[in-house]
Image (tube, coloured by chain):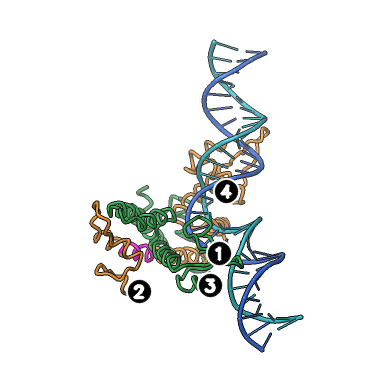
Chain colours: A orange, B green, C cyan, D blue
Amino acid sequence: MNIGDVADLSGLPAKTIRYYEDIGLVEPLRSANGYRSFRQSDVHKLAFLGRARALGFTIEDCRSLLKLYADTDRASAEVKQIAEEHLDRIDRKIAELTEMRATLSHLVDACAGDHRPDCPILADLAMEEDKTRTARAAD
Amino acid sequence: MNIGDVADLSGLPAKTIRYYEDIGLVEPLRSANGYRSFRQSDVHKLAFLGRARALGFTIEDCRSLLKLYADTDRASAEVKQIAEEHLDRIDRKIAELTEMRATLSHLVDACAGDHRPDCPILADLAMEEDKTRTARAAD
DNA sequence: GTTGACCTTCCAGTGAATGGAACCCTTATG
DNA sequence: CATAAGGGTTCCATTCACTGGAAGGTCAAC
């Protein structure tokens, strides 16, 4: 199969598939004309990668997961550990964003958003000691 | 003030401050010895930048916000718009992560995490049509 | 005069692709 | 036979916001 078909099947852009070959995640064969020739197993691997990436696993995680997938003697504990670490990363990220969101939405609510220059958002960023103090006082 | 003091005051690494000069966010003076010489206003700007970045604004957002801050004829609506767009970005990101989190934690819970090879996480990534089907059926 | 803590510039790398240029291969059509 | 469309190929540059490191200049103290 050529790269275009694989792109359609796996949902990954051809560019990305080439990149994945570059970094050694897949190793398609080559046809006589120099075109990449993907086996069924390559397509499967790429779809696997697509789903792992969609869950936010890093490329290095993906590499490990693929290795574990290929190893029928693996311990599921190894897989689980990777997934749990990733879950922690996600939780930390969500917490960070949620905090940003809280502060920001607070500021947005306080801002008139009209033609006048007075702006609690800027005031907060500038840390002007003002009447318009917000949650940032807790810093 | 030299860069080290400013780094301490603003909480930004010296490297980052140099980078911000590079991309034109601050323009410190120079002493005779070639050292950067920061005015009070530069320190203030850098602290502003630090807070804006901590809220997740992009560098380009920061550039716009600084410009608006300097412009006493601004309309707060302009500031608010930038903030609201950013809030949307955050919300989208949180939603994305929350979905990842849900799927992933589901899989983690289903995985024994022992010495045996059977693993619902890998099964899901490989899309094996199995007893261990999860929410992914909705795809 | 030498140590050590500063400061300088410049170059490379991060993650995970993505965009584009320049060029080759295949197939169909005039 | 020419050529045009629609594949494919490689290689290089760019993204974002820094960060690390090398090689070297400056300054204050001892």
> How far apart, in angstroms, are the residues tagged by discs 3 and 4?
42 Å
Residue sitting at x 53%, y 71%: B2
> How far apart, in angstroms, are the residues tagged by discs 1 and 4?
47 Å
Viewer-side label of 3, 4: 3
Residue sitting at x 23%, y 56%: A112
Whether residue B85 is situated above or below residue A103 in the rendered picture? above
- Tell me the crowding category of disc 1: few under 14, some 14 to 19, or many 20 or more residues within 10 angstroms, Cα based: few
**What amino acid is labelled 3 in the image?**
Gly
Q: Which residue is mark 1?
A: B30
> How far apart, in angstroms, are the residues tagged by discs 2 and 4?
44 Å
- Which chain contains the residue that carries disc 2? A
- Provide residue A8's location: percent of width, then percent of height: 48, 38
Label placed on residue A139: 2
The answer to whether residue B69 is seen in the rendering is yes
Viewer-side label of 1, 4: 1
> In this image, B20 relative to A135: left or right?
right
**Magenta stretch encompasses residue B103:** no
**Which of the image's four quarters has the N terminus of chain A?**
top right
**What amino acid is labelled 1 in the image?**
Arg
Q: Could you tell me which secondary element the residue under label 1 belongs to? A: strand
Q: Provide the major secondary structure of the magenta segment.
A: helix
Q: Could you tell me which secondary element the residue under label 3 belongs to? A: helix
- Which chain contains the residue that carries disc 4? A
Label placed on residue A20: 4
> How far apart, in angstroms, are the residues tagged by discs 3 and 2?
23 Å
The magenta region covers A94-102
- Tell me the crowding category of disc 4: few under 14, some 14 to 19, or many 20 or more residues within 10 angstroms, Cα based: some
